[in-house]
Image: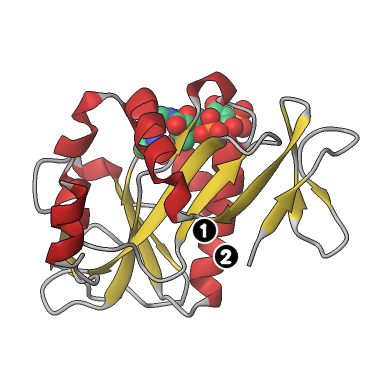
Amino acid sequence: MESLLVPSVAGGFAAQSGSEPVQEVAGQAVVVAPESPADEAAREVLLDRAMGPGRKRKSSEKLRRGRLPADGLAFSAMDGDGRLVGTVRLWNVRAGHNGPNALLLGPLAVEPALKGAGIGVALMRHAIAEARRRGHGAILLVGDPGYYERFGFSAERSDELAMPGPYEKHRLLALELIDGALAGARGVVRASGRRIEVQALRRAA
Ligand SMILES: CC(C)(COP(=O)(O)OP(=O)(O)OC[C@H]1O[C@@H](n2cnc3c(N)ncnc32)[C@H](O)[C@@H]1OP(=O)(O)O)[C@@H](O)C(=O)NCCC(=O)NCCS
């Protein structure tokens, strides 16, 4: 699935034929598309610029390291010139000890010069819709409640869960895509995604 974002007359979201959300960003069309291997180098640069050098020390990184993102759930936002201006990925996890399958969202990052133009919201809406379409039950993330509440995330369903490393408890948030998907989930969130093959890691080193 691909979501085309094109200029709207009034700015902000508007319906394009086909009913995908559309938006003008800095006067040009921005497309949210499945991440491609060709995006990898630009994505690393964008993450460094948007999140700084400490990004790899986050507890979420422990659940991502050496793993592949969940199938079909890594997205890039590209501007009209084909430049990467945003990224988001989701990862397979188990929500607690013997807990249900869930997704961990992150990192979400937007080109700093284009902050506040709606790219983050577009990436989030697209990622959540696609996770729902693929039948996933819940999404977890560590982030600012003030940003993620607008998508339905709250600490209500993640209260008994913990990250495998330092994090601020009030920032561990959850969104159920299927009612009750996180009922009774408790304990430390664990990685459950496919591992990156060792040969690929050696080639990347
Ligand atoms: C957070 C981030 C992804 C948001 O993307 P964006 O494209 O700038 O945001 P959008 O334009 O889609 O949304 C803007 C809205 O979010 C709000 N917002 C942005 N960051 C926020 C935050 N940390 N907390 C609360 N609200 C926030 C803005 O105030 C604005 O609110 P409004 O719609 O009521 O005016 C982006 O700023 C970014 O890359 N930040 C650095 C990396 C980062 O912190 N990633 C998230 C990890 S938790």
Farthest-out residue, front: 203
As drawn, 169 above or below 51: below
User: Any mark on residue 127, and which?
Assistant: 1
Numbered disc 1: secondary structure? helix
As drawn, 1 above or below 79: below
List x then y, in percent, for residue 168: 19, 38
Residue pointed to by mark 2: 129
Q: Could you tell me if residue 160 is visible in this image?
A: no
**What residue is shown at x 38% (from left), y 63% (from top)?**
139
Whether disc 2's CB lies below 8 Å from ligand 1 is answered no
Q: Could you tell me if residue 77 is visible in this image?
A: yes
Q: At label 1, which amino acid type do we have?
A: Ala
Q: Nearer the viewer, residue 100 or 51?
A: 51
Q: Residues within 10 Å of mark 2 (few under 14, many from 20)?
A: few
List x then y, in percent, for residue 46: 41, 31
Q: At label 2, which amino acid type do we have?
A: Ala
Q: Quadrant of the N terminus?
A: bottom right
**What residue is shown at x 46% (from left), y 77% (from top)?**
178
**What residue is shown at x 72% (from left), y 25% (from top)?**
26
Q: Quadrant of the rendered structure where residue 180 is?
A: bottom left
**What residue is shown at x 52% (from left), y 61% (from top)?**
128
Q: Residues within 10 Å of mark 1 (few under 14, many from 20)?
A: many
Side of 123 where 74 appears, left or right:
left
Q: Quadrant of the rendered structure where residue 186 is?
A: bottom left
**Mark 1 near mark 2, Cβ–Cβ under 8 Å?**
yes
Numbered disc 2: secondary structure? helix
